[in-house]
Amino acid sequence: MHTYSKSVLGLSAIRSATFVDRLHDYETALVGSGYKSRVVRFHLHSVAHFGVWLEREGVELGTIDETTVAAFERHRSRCRCPATSRSRCRSVVSCIHVFLHHLRTQGMAPAADPPAQPKLLVSEFLQWMTAHRGAVGATIASYQLYVTNLVDFLGDDPQTYTATGLRDFMAKRYRHYARNSMRMVLAAVRMFLRYLAVEGRCRPGLEHALTSPAIWSQQSLPQGLAAEDVQRILTLCPSTPTGIRDRAVLLLLTRLGLRASDVVALRLSDVCFETATIKVSGKGSREVQLPLPQELGTTADKIVDHVPCSILVVR
């Protein structure tokens, strides 16, 4: 490849000039998108390995899809491809998905199939989550994935669900998950089982059959910034409209402890200068009134006077 002094593993074993050209184009697209050199190189090693495997399997580049990528993922556990990267990192498959998306945008691979509609049982659960639990966005998407996997594994009749079946599902489908990720799956599955029990569709108490993995206190406690470091960061914000906006965001995070999603959802109308309060919509769309610190109130007043509305969007 033209960007690096070292050769890309597996590239010399690819006979297809078309695939090599596509790999050059992909490299250019990654560099143009701002990827760091080491990340680009990891992508190129992964895609070159994919190219070697495609030729060994006799698969045409213009026919690849998610099924092809899944077959390549299974191949990696028993890979014997010569002179290719032997990385076992799960990010390799993510690189192939990015490459597939690149080919599709160039019209060189079949378009993706439209997303399948959730099963009726899952759809009803998601509607219940939205209406009664205030769940939105990423929560609904992750719950749909985990609950759909459960229904595919155990079947559409919740009356047949057993503690043994639930434990078997977790052991076979999510044994490779880290402990924190496993807790997310368990949260979705338990909520689904509670919903089914409330609706009279399965035996109550099944959620207690699943135990959470142990996460010891302070095992990975993150280190926060010292007060002087926070103050130094705040003083670096310039007096430009964007700098004033950034200072307000930092104050919301450090003084009030808001989450990033809380800050994104805020509007100037949520700030009440008369009562020195700020309205925040937390989880479940619950609104709370928080005190408006003097420092934050002064910054918010500057935003009203000096910052154009187009700059207020936090991304």
Image (cartoon, helix red, strand yellow):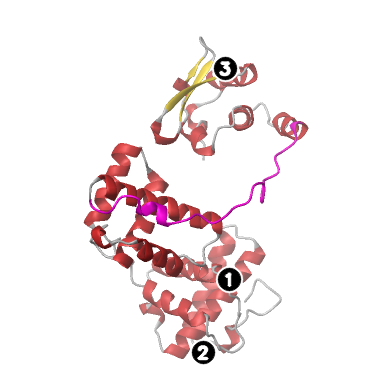
Residues in magenta, as a range: 201-227
Q: Residue furthest right?
A: 228
Image coordinates for residue 234, horizontal then vertical, percent = 70, 30
> Is residue 105 in sight in this rendering?
no
- Identify the residue at image location x=59%, y=57%: 34
- Identify the residue at image location x=30%, y=47%: 195
Give the class, few, some or many, for how many residues have Cα within 10 Å of label 2's Cα (few <14, many ≥20): few
Look at the magenta stretch and give its main secondary structure.
loop
Q: In what quadrant of the picture does the N terminus appear?
A: bottom right
**First reached walking from the N terminus: tag 2 or tag 1:** 2
**First reached walking from the N terminus: tag 3 or tag 1:** 1
Image coordinates for residue 56, horizontal then vertical, percent = 47, 90
Image marks 2 and 1: residues in contact by CB distance under 8 Å: no
Helix, strand or loop at mark 1: loop
The numbered mark at residue 15 is 2
Q: Is residue 309 above or below residue 164?
A: above
Specify whether 156 is left or right of 291: left
Helix, strand or loop at mark 2: loop
Which of the pair 180/15 is nearer the observer? Answer: 180
The residue that mark 3 highlights is 301
Helix, strand or loop at mark 3: helix
Image coordinates for residue 199, horizontal then vertical, percent = 23, 46
The residue that mark 1 highlights is 89
Image marks 3 and 2: residues in contact by CB distance under 8 Å: no
Question: Label 3 sits on what residue type?
Answer: Asp
Q: What is the C-alpha distance between the residues marked 3 and 1?
A: 49 Å
